[in-house]
Amino acid sequence: MSDNPVRLFGSSEEFATFGNNALAFVRKVQSDDMNRRFPNAPDLPEGIELWGLFSADGKPIAMADDEQVLVEDALEMDLLTVHRQ
């Protein structure tokens, strides 16, 4: 293990927004969880497993029942996607 501590570049605010306009992540989501986490969004039917596309800071961009659709959407928005379990 290295004795060198990890040092962040820039301010805390800059680091928090790093990648917001360039990175997004795709992961499986449950409609019930999305309804709870984002109460101002339109209600989704309960008990459905979906795929979500999220900005680097965790805000939802899009939902679909097909992962590949979201990857293609992200490419059209010039976003690089990473996949989370």
Image (cartoon, rainbow, N blue to C red):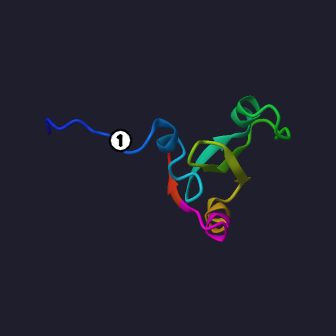
Above or below, 7 against 52 in this view is above
Q: What crowding class fits label 1: few (fewer than 14 Cα within 10 Å), some (14-19), or many (20 or more)?
A: few
Which of the 4 image quadrants contains residue 8? top left
Above or below, 76 against 40 in this view is below
In this rendering, position of residue 68 left or right of residue 15: right
Circle 1 SS class? loop
Q: Quadrant of the N terminus?
A: top left
Which residue occupies the extreme top position in the image?
A: 36
Q: Which residue is mark 1?
A: 8
Image position, residue 49 (x, y; %): 68, 44
Image position, residue 61 (x, y; %): 70, 51
Image position, residue 67 (x, y; %): 63, 59
Q: Which residues are magenta?
A: 73-80
Image position, residue 63 (x, y; %): 72, 52
In this rendering, position of residue 69 left or right of residue 79: right
Which residue occupies the extreme front position in the image?
A: 11
The verdict on residue 75 being magenta is: yes
Nearest to the observer: residue 58 or residue 13: 13
Identified by mark 1, the residue type is: Leu
Task: Tell me the residue at 61%/68% (across/down).
Answer: 78
Task: Tell me the residue at 67%/59% (across/down).
Answer: 66
Q: How many marks?
A: 1
Nearest to the observer: residue 60 or residue 64: 60
The verdict on residue 6 being magenta is: no
